[in-house]
Amino acid sequence: MSIFPRHGAGAIAGVLLLSVLPLSHTRVSRARVLCARVTSEHTADTSDLQRFRQFAPWQDKTGNDLALAVWRYLCDYETGVYHFNEVLDGPDPFDEYATVRDPLKILNVYNMGYCGIFGPVLDGIFQGIGFEQGRSFGLVRWNHCATEVWYDNAWHYFDMDVRGVLLDGAGTVVSLAEAQRNRDLWVAPPRPIEPFFPNEQDKGRVFEIYRDSPVYRYYRWFEGTHTMDFSLRQGESFTRWWTPQGGRWHHLPRYSRTKWVRELLLTEPVGMKPNHRDFTRWNHGNGLFHYAPNLSADSTDFRDGVYAVRNLAPGRQGLHLVSAGEGEVIFEVFTPYIIVPQVNDLDNPDDDREASTVTLDTVLPVSVAVSLDQGLTWKPATMSRNGRRVVDLTSLVKGTYGYLLRLSTSGDPGQAALMHLAIDTWVQVAPISLPRLKRGENHLCYEMGDRYGLRTIPMPVQPDTANPKDLEKYVVALPQDYDPQRHTARIVGDITLRLAAPAGMKIAWLAVGATFRTHQGEPAVKTDNRIAYAVDAPQDFREVYRSAVPTWVSHWRYNWDTDLRLKEPAEVVYVKFHGDPGLNAMRACLHLLPKDPPTTGVRIVHTYVLDGRSYDKTVSLDEPGAYTVSCDGDPENVSVMMAVPSR
């Protein structure tokens, strides 16, 4: 028997019933370290765009000065993103919805992209730090995409992909329209183009391409529900490296079907890297979540870290059966960084390995299952034999952002079942997001809290609208006008998600978003897409978004993402979407209040190399606060680890 009801047995009419537990099961209280992060004075905090806005070098800037400062940072050799190629994740088979255009994912997970990613991502960053409106645009004759942002009553053109802006005599960034009509800005600029513009091409010729090219303008082509918050349990550590670790990255076979991309991937170090080496010093980074709780009764690790349990409890040798019969336990793996395997044959994803491995030391046979939908459905992984066994979950969990792990066994009362457990999960990390050390005294800070200062646990929910069976698990009812193959308008009319907190927890706030279809040009004013929500019951919905699409839009779809801050924490929130002319994708991230107050103590280890010698600087903190690390020379940053000791 599962801890969670299976769809069809415990779910009615496609309603998400995450909060239902059979009476014989126990949801264990948790007091883990929540929303923890380490920041450095040398690096902007990319975990949230509101915190990114507070970076000291531009904290007090506005308008042109702010936009230029942020753009230069994102184009910098040390702190900037770099050109690679397309980047996709998620299950949606349609590229328009699978291409990563979430600023937080690009800044923290990937560090890379191409113009069709960077144009909307920079738009999203600008709007996320307070600019009221922006847009990305496609330049047909150059097959290129870049960004315009509105301030001082004018548009201003920024290019994060080829790292260029055009400045007038006053140092103000000009608009795309001005760039299309003023040749002197390219060939005899009053101020130099910096930090870079395609130096292998004649800039006069580039101007001619711009001058003669049709322009397509994209409205809100970026997404915005992803979170970088995560938690650490007793007995868990999270280590992030600035450099690749053993050929682990988010790889799709389609990446290597293009000759130059394949050759780039196979160039040492193997994996994603820039095709302009002078753009950045970085390739991609990696991270490792290592969770090895003490399962004995002498420790509080199990109570702190378990998700749910039935008929199992800590004993002298680990977990034992409380009474005769079946017992099972669930642990949660959540990461804001995408889970990645060790990639072997670029063309054969079946030989990827070690994305997430589970090491078990068992006395009784234990079966292993994984859920990717908060326990609604389960997929078997393997059956362990008595003794120590490593279960490789790669085929089930690579390319995701977390899962539930269920371990099931049976036996006599008091019988030892599980003596040892370790879960090792590899992720991809953007090096530009890490808190680096430099020569001299480095001022760093250990901080906790989500963007509203709350210590919450994230729970993403992203129904697959391309898959009716998956969509049905999350909605009150399937919409009447729904065709998953109608990619540009899958849903027309209303659809309602039911978003429930796990038992014993409540939703403090949530981020919700959707990908809508729109009318274009002058008919854009006829677009009538909406989002509304209700608490506890699907009635008396409060509207939080009604479309107001600008008439300059010339692309058929856009995104809208927003935060819903509840007056009081709630167990269930209903979100109703209305698509007219259409709705194509939905997403949400619940931010949950734990049942028990979180703990705060962590151990932080900065590893770096100085003059050929490796150093570990360890800092133990009981509460969030500032600390310093001094380096006598120029350090090569290797890794930073955060850990909550086993108790």
Image (tube, helix red, strand yellow):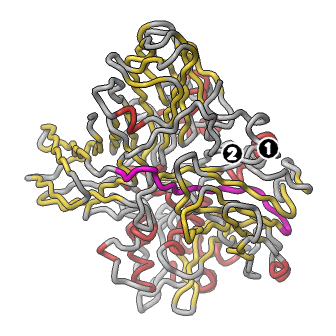
Q: Is residue 410 above or below residue 236?
A: above
- Where residue 177 sits: x, y (%)? 63, 84
| Quadrant of res 538 | bottom right
Most foreground residue, 302 or 284: 302
- The mark that comes first in sequence, 2 or 1, is 1
Instruction: Look at the image and say whether residue 594 sits in the magenta stretch.
Output: yes
- Where residue 512 sits: x, y (%)? 63, 62
Q: Do the residues under discs 2 and 1 have CB atoms within 8 angstroms?
A: yes
- Which type of secondary structure does the marked residue at label 1 adopt? loop
Residue at (77, 66) in percent of width and height: 539
Residue labelled with disc 2: 17
- Residues shaded magenta: 580-598
Instruction: Report the amino acid beneath label 2.
Output: Leu
Question: Left or right of 614: which side holds 266?
Answer: right
Most foreground residue, 532 or 538: 538
The quarter of the rendered structure image containing the N terminus is: top right
Q: Of all residues shown, which one is farthest toward the left?
A: 632
On the question of residue 613 being in view, the answer is: yes
Residue labelled with disc 1: 12
Q: Is residue 612 above or below residue 635?
A: above
| Quadrant of res 180 | bottom right
On the question of residue 183 being in view, the answer is: no
Residue at (42, 77) in percent of width and height: 68
